[in-house]
Image (cartoon, rainbow, N blue to C red):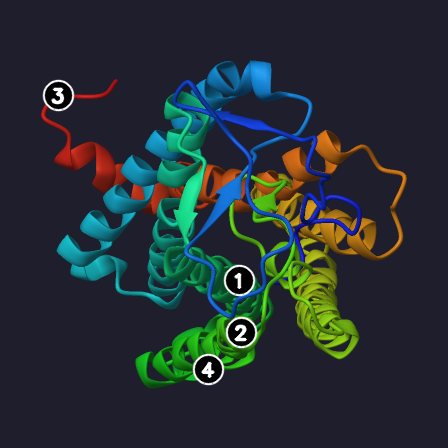
Amino acid sequence: MFSVSGCDHLGIATLSSEVLMKSKGKTIMPPLNTSHRSPVTFLLMGIPGLEHLHVWIGIPFCSMYVVALVGNVAILAVVRAERSLHEPMFLFLCMLSITDLVLSTSTLPRMLCLFWLGAHDIAFDACLTQMFFIHSFTTMESGFFLAMAIDRYVAICHPLHHTTILTHARITVMGIIVVIRGVAFFSPHPILLRQLPYCRTRIIAHTYCEFMAVLKLACVDIGATSRYSLSVASIIGSCDAVLIAVSYVFILHSVFHLPSRDATFKALGTCGSHVCVILVFYSTAGFSIFTHRFGKNVPAHIHIFIANMYLLVPPFLNPIVYGIRTKKLREHVFKLLPVKVA
């Protein structure tokens, strides 16, 4: 999920010398047989087979980025301004919003340059930096989903002890652990890639720099490194997903035992929207992992398109589901608007 969003048959385009790319009206044929430790640039192909639709694909992608940017910034501004919102749920939501901003900003602007301006070139160092941010902050996204699920569990199943269990100090510690985990497990990735010699095509059949895509350009045996990346991604993602599922099982058990039927339906509506966002994230990320490992017959454009979804959709949906649908936060947002909302 976190370090393998490309696929085995398309992570890199091990193309023959007959494959050409068009960039800014010029024909480019990257060297295929040169061997050097640090290539100057790579070439991002985009979505193979859908190059003629790049301009149109960029429109909904850009729209989602704008919504993610405005929504997450609004959440951060409102929670910072309103001391009454300095509660566990909203503090975790702020951490998630910061993660979403970094994650979407590290991918979308560069992706739109590729779609709209034909900017295929990306410097080697920039590629490794983008890779680090994508994989580390995707891991943090998963960690904050888990932290928010734990918060909901405590709030619903142990409401009288919510603030005493999740104190500001413990919330801070949980946030630090999530950040350290993301950085610790995926900092080795760009470091490993920098040490490898490269001797194949510089073309990456993807919309962004993805670990496995770049790794397969190396001239050495990549089996151990590949297994490490797959194992880390699978273990972290699986553990988080299982713990989130367990939390929501307990939450649903408590919800169905609420004395008021209206309260039950309201809680189910809130939990249902949260679960939908989480399912989108883990299903698309899981699809990328298992397609990379087992789905060699999955069409390249489908795999890459879905690989983009878990980077784009959660930052777009999170402000809507966790922000707009949360009454307390919504009321404070409307108070800050220059016009009255009916």
Q: Nearer the viewer, residue 299 or 26?
A: 26
35, above or below 10, in the image: below
Q: Earlier in the sequence, mark 4 or mark 1?
A: 1
Which residue is disc 1 drawn over?
Answer: 135
Quadrant (top left/top right/bottom left/bottom right) for the C terminus: top left
Q: Which of 40 and 172 is in front in this view?
A: 40
Tag 3 near tag 4, CB within 8 Å = no
Q: Nearer the viewer, residue 301 or 60?
A: 301
Cα–Cα span, label 1 and label 3: 40 Å
Helix, strand or loop status at disc 3: loop
Cα–Cα span, label 2 and label 1: 7 Å
Whether residue 262 is visible: no
Q: Where is residue 13 in the image (x, y as percent from the top left)?
A: 68, 43
Residue 186: which disc?
2
Q: Which residue is drawn at 17% across and 61% down?
A: 83
Residue 234: which disc?
none
Q: Which of marks 1 and 3 is nearer the N terminus?
A: 1
**Label 4: few (<14), some (14–19) or many (≥20) C-alpha neighbours in 10 Å:** some
Tell which tag, 4 or 1, sits nearer the viewer: 1
Tell which tag, 4 or 2, sits nearer the viewer: 2
Q: Which residue is drawn at 76% across and 79% down?
A: 224
Q: Position of residue 255 (x, y in %)?
A: 66, 55
Which residue is disc 4 drawn over?
Answer: 177
Kind of residue at badge 4 = Ile
**Label 3: few (<14), some (14–19) or many (≥20) C-alpha neighbours in 10 Å:** few
Q: Position of residue 208 (x, y in %)?
A: 51, 45
Cα–Cα span, label 4 and label 2: 14 Å
Where on the picture, by quarter, is residue 117?
top left
Which residue is disc 3 drawn over?
Answer: 339
